[in-house]
Image (spheres, helix red, strand yellow):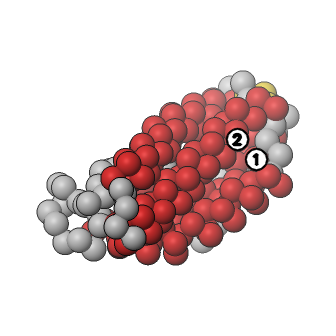
């Protein structure tokens, strides 16, 4: 049986809150009339460049979070206890087939986004995380195919789990990086 540990909701929503509220979300604060100096510098580039990049990637980040939640629904479908959620090859492979095209689209479309030079490593790592996630999905699908044919599926599933865990570790690193970017951006735009 294929087993994936479910990460806390914070990780599933990795970036969904990292870039701030979307235009559709109401905010509890009154609109600010403070002018922001877009030419101010951060350690990642100008405020204008950094906010432009974050605005450009936010829809992709939201899509990644939604796809991940959709995939993790297969973990809950086995109806085991919340502390030990396990997916079977069948339900995980079916869900992997459903979400893989969405992850691949996000991966491909991120090529069109040009990060400021100092955010290029963050952008590269985001793509690396997506590649690992896509590989894990592909291996899950392959594992189920091997299992259906009566072959040795355990190594395939173990590889899928390892790739999934590698993507999760990248998510942790990206979340830390995003917090640094947002903190630096806040400091750069704070009034003197």
Circle 2 is placed at which residue position? 123
The crowding category of the residue bearing disc 1, from other C-alpha atoms within 10 Å (few below 14, some 14 to 19, many at least 20), is some
- Please state the horizontal and vertical placement of residue 12, each as a whole percent of the image: 42, 55
Residue 185 against residue 43 in the figure, above or below: below
Residue 7 against residue 98 in the figure, above or below: above
- Please state the horizontal and vertical placement of residue 185, each as a whole percent of the image: 66, 35
The crowding category of the residue bearing disc 2, from other C-alpha atoms within 10 Å (few below 14, some 14 to 19, many at least 20), is many
Residue at horizontal 60 percent and vertical 51 percent from the top: 130
Residue 130 against residue 62 in the figure, above or below: above
Check if mark 2's residue and mark 1's residue have beta carbons within 8 Å: yes
- Compared across the picture, whether 15 is left or right of 46 comes to left
Mark 2 secondary-structure assignment: helix
Residue situated in front as seen by the camera: 144 or 137:
144
Residue situated in front as seen by the camera: 19 or 135:
135
The image quarter containing residue 87 is bottom left
Q: Quadrant of the N terminus?
A: bottom left
How far is the residue under mark 2 from the one under mark 1?
10 Å
The image quarter containing residue 143 is bottom left
- Compared across the picture, whether 112 is left or right of 139 comes to right
- Please state the horizontal and vertical placement of residue 123, each as a whole percent of the image: 70, 41
Residue at horizontal 37 percent and vertical 72 percent from the top: 148
Circle 1 is placed at which residue position? 53
Mark number displayed over residue 189: none
């Amino acid at each position: 049986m294929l087993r994936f540990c479910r990460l806390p909701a914070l990780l599933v929503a990795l970036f969904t809150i990292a870039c701030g509220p979307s235009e559709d979300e109401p905010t509890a604060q009154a609109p600010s009339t403070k002018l922001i100096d877009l030419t101010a510098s951060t350690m990642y580039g100008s405020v204008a460049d950094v906010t432009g990049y974050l605005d450009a990637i936010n829809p992709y980040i939201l899509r990644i979070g939604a796809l991940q939640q959709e995939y993790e629904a297969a973990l809950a479908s086995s109806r085991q206890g919340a502390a030990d959620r396990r997916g079977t090859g069948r339900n995980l492979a079916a869900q992997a087939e459903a979400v893989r095209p969405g992850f691949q689209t996000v991966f491909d479309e991120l090529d069109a986004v040009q990060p400021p030079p100092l955010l290029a490593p963050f952008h590269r790592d985001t793509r690396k995380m997506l590649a690992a996630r896509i590989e894990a999905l592909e291996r899950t699908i392959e594992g189920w195919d091997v299992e259906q044919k009566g072959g040795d599926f355990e190594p395939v599933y173990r590889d899928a789990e390892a790739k999934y865990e590698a993507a999760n570790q990248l998510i942790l690193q990206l979340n830390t990086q995003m917090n640094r970017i947002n903190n630096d951006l806040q400091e750069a735009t704070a009034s003197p």
